[in-house]
Image (cartoon, helix red, strand yellow):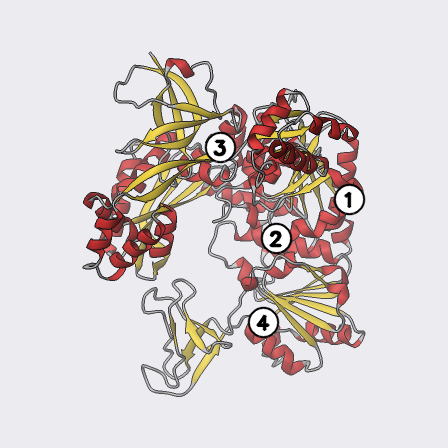
Amino acid sequence: MTLTGGVVIDGLNIKKDLFYYKIPPFLVNKIRVGSKVSVPFGPKNMKVSAFLFTLEKKSSDSDLKEVQSVISPPLFNEQTRDLIFFVSKKFFIPLHIFVNKVLKGLSPEIYRRFVICTDPEKLKNASESFTGKKKEIAEFILSRKIIPVSVVKKRFGSSAERILKLFEEEGFIDRESVSEKYSLRYVSLNIPYEKLDQVLGDFSDKKLKSSAAALLARLANSDVPLREDSLRRGIKYGKRVIEDLIEKGFLISRRVGTDAGNGNRGKMKLSMICGLPLMERSERIISLIEKNSNGKTLIIFPELSVLRRVSGIYKKRFGDKVFVWDGKNKRKLIEAIYFKEKEIFLTTPFAMFVKIPNLKNLILENASSRYFKKTDFTPFDSVVVSVKKAEMEHLHLVFSTSVPEENIFYLIENGLLTDVMCDRKHIEYSRIRIVDMRNEFKKRNYKMISLALQKEIKNALKDSKNVALLLNRKSYSTFVMCRECGYVMKCPKCGVPLYYDKEQNVLFCHICGYKEKPPDVCPRCGSVNIKYFSGGIQKLEEQIRKMLPDANVVKLISEGKSESIINSSEFEKTIFVGTEYLVSHLDLSDISVFGLVSADIFLNRFSFDASVETFSVISDIATEMGRKPFYIQTYIPEHFVLNYARSFDFRRFFEQEFEMRKELKYPPFGNLIVFSFLSTDKKQAEKSAENFKKAILTVPENGKNVYGPSPSAIQRKGDYYVFEVTVKSDNISPILRSKYIEALNTLKNVKISVEPYISVRESLE
């Protein structure tokens, strides 16, 4: 039997899980899970750094390469490793992709591949006959001699790898791994400030004395330990002087101990705060922290805009004990945890994968936000992962929200979330009015805003107050049709109706981005009677400006990518018009009237959880507005979501919603995994989906049902045809995931993606 380690190669974003290496006898007592190690990789056995994830004894395999050295002590412990494993397995993410996303920037040392020009004269002579990009890359290498491979690829694109390989074969260049080291060690003074002069007196060499003075000055001006490489940066003989001062006892050093445990005992505790506006929920959380002041608190936010809205409240109460992290530069987070005596961390979801010693409270703010679901940025469901983390580390997990989402309510119904603080006063007396837009036509009102809401807006502006209008659609219109023959302008690739952007005066496809100029006459019948139907923000803004020319109109949409918060109290006689972006980026405290221009856009989303999302959006707005008027416009006023949202009756809402979900085995009563196959060849996309279905039908899995292959709801996305295979199961089998990873790496000319909707039950097993 041989001790074997499973590793993830640092910086290698490939669709693989672990690579395995033998652990040589001289490293057996030095290596641990979480260690950073050096391993040979690839056909040339280049040195690369890797994270060690598993250690186990296996039958001897002579083909396995050996770990060469331990670069650093553990950067994470087994609990964190197991949480990473959980997310990778349940959300179908290859370990190399996920680990390099989670741990990027945490590593103290990496091996970076460089292009080294081994024969400049030969390359110079040969380049005279080169043309195009080949000549450009040759000249670039000759001008630099040594250059990172990543720089060449970034500058010259996808063809760079092929050309570099050709140069390598011709003997012009070589590619080598070069170690770039960053210290994990932190240094601080071990003597009083007034004795620093005595330390300098120990140096007879003037150059070393000058370096020591510069180092000590940096430490004296810092209230926290400094990382060694930062401390000595730009100081000659810095490393030598630091070692000398540590040896003499003038300085002390320590490494970040990210393998420390929490020391928590007992079981996890689940609580919920709901029914209150964001700021009032924050006050309740502050009270909770004060009552349980013997540990640290991690507060996770779905959007940086929400974090920034409340960070001032926490800083005002707890001062320097608060650390705000925007998800960038993980070293700053590590330093805040271990050296800056921070106790409250306001962060993004990725902080759940960094060990915080003595962590007691884990809080999800805006826990029902759709941005806590799986997104391109966070490829997992934060509610599901937070429950798993709380279960593993015995934490007090608090869901702070206007209203629970499906997984949270499932925990309530099954007696796992017993501490529910739900304050209904903000909703019970709220002035929610459901407006049936069908009646507007009878009154000959063809505007996007109902007569009742128009009157409310005019009264508010007359009193110099502000109004907010939410319409979750940006374009001027969502389809363009000839009123003579009924012809609808569609995307030639995707087959979906083209939207009209009036600001740019173009028709565009919201799927693939195709654009064309709007026609003057119908392409089919030649009629000039072309009508722009339905409407978005652009049309709404136009109607408002015509109806209320004196009003100040401010548009809030996500295109600017700004995380700044608009304070409504700084405005008057203003109408804020925006998409869902408006809800998180506008402080509603000085909004006197709110209008949801079309609830139907939310209700008609092509998603099984559209009802829950609609209920959540309405509840978020209602809690913030309190007793101020809130108009909800719809063509389906009888919809059960609107009925229960008006009275904030989330229990009866979920009872009705769960009836359907139980019958269809949708989350949280089962797992729903949708595999999509995309190809420019329609038959190939369908055949690949069919072969995948046959492969997974052999997978033993409880309560498994497999459907498809069937065309996606949007059958074409640009040049690609899309077919789906859908799996419903009680539990996720590791074999199902392995079949997906295998397909990722073997399918040619076919793209495959997965959309997993995972039940919180997976966290409790």
**Residue at the spot 61% in from the left edge and 38% down from the top edge:** 333
Quarter of the figure that contains the N terminus: top left
Q: Which residue is mark 3?
A: 84
Mark 4 → mark 3, Cα distance in angstroms:
51 Å
Q: Which residue is mark 4?
A: 438
Between 150 and 280, which is closer to the camera in this rendering?
150
**Image coords of residue 505 (percent x, y):** 46, 78
Q: Which residue is mark 2?
A: 615
- Rate crowding at label 3 as few (under 14), some (14 to 19) or many (20 or more) other CA atoms within 10 Å: some
Question: For residue 602, what is the image quadrant?
Answer: bottom right
Circle nearer the N terminus (1, 4): 1
Inspect this view and state whether residue 701 appears.
no
Extreme top residue here?
A: 1
Identity, as a three-letter code, of the amino acid under mark 4: Arg
Asked whether the beta carbons under mark 1 and mark 3 sit within 8 Å of each other, the answer is: no
Question: For residue 411, what is the image quadrant?
Answer: top right
